[in-house]
Image (tube, rainbow, N blue to C red):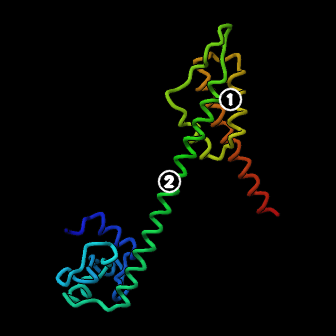
Amino acid sequence: MAVTKRLRYEVLRRDNYSCRYCGRSAPEVKLTVDHVVPVALGGSDEPSNLVAACADCNAGKSSVPADAPLVADVTADAMRWSRAMQQVSDMRIMQIQYDNDILEWFSGLWEGWTYGPDNLPVPAPDGFDSVLTFLANGMSPEEIDNLVRVAMNANHIRPEATWKYFCGCCWKRIRENVEIAGQLIAAEGDA
């Protein structure tokens, strides 16, 4: 099996774009991906057997097996990389679960409001993903809850415009929060 472009990129990135044999780095030298244990001697295309190498070091090595410390070093790096990638995966899963919980909470909050004598549901968009954006921009769930109340009680707004009005309130609050944060930082600098 050949080393894919993606795997080549990941190995170069893992090795900080530096030759594992001499330490020189790009753009000073042209880097390639080298098999620590050559394929001719039974080495695989697994990341644990691949290192970044400059053209000179790679050409000089040929099919000579690498010394044990380098193999152990590469294996340790591959294990650290694997653990880091698993952590990233776990973090992403937790973020997805959190986002789903937030969207479920907000959906219940929004759908709890009605209008008119027939208690019709207040029109909503196809999804509430904007709420995740508001949270990512520093708003708290309590602020969002408060602004839903503001929007729902705004009698001068047509029901079908309530979502747009709510979003406008959120963006205004975010701008206010940014301004206040800037003032706090400026006050710290003056102290």
Task: Where is residue 109? Give x, y as percent.
Answer: 65, 29
Q: Is 3 displayed left or right of 72 in the figure?
A: left
Quickly name the residue at label 2. 92
Name the spot of residue 182 as percent of width and height, x first.
71, 52
Q: Is residue 183 above or below residue 117?
A: below
Relative horizontal placement of residue 33, taking residue 113 as reference (left or right): left
Indicate left or right for 19 with 183 as reference.
left
In front: mark 1 or mark 2?
A: 2
Q: Measuring 24% from the left and 85% from the top, which residue is drawn there?
A: 58
**Residue 3 drawn at (x, y percent):** 24, 69
**For numbered disc 2, what is the local secondary structure?**
helix
How far is disc 1 from disc 2 in space, using C-alphas?
28 Å
Residue 148's label in the rendered image is 1
What amino acid does circle 1 point to? Val
Mark 2 burial class by Cα count in 10 Å: few <14, some 14-19, many 20+: few
The residue shown at (74%, 57%) is 185
- Which of these two is toward me, 19 or 110? 110
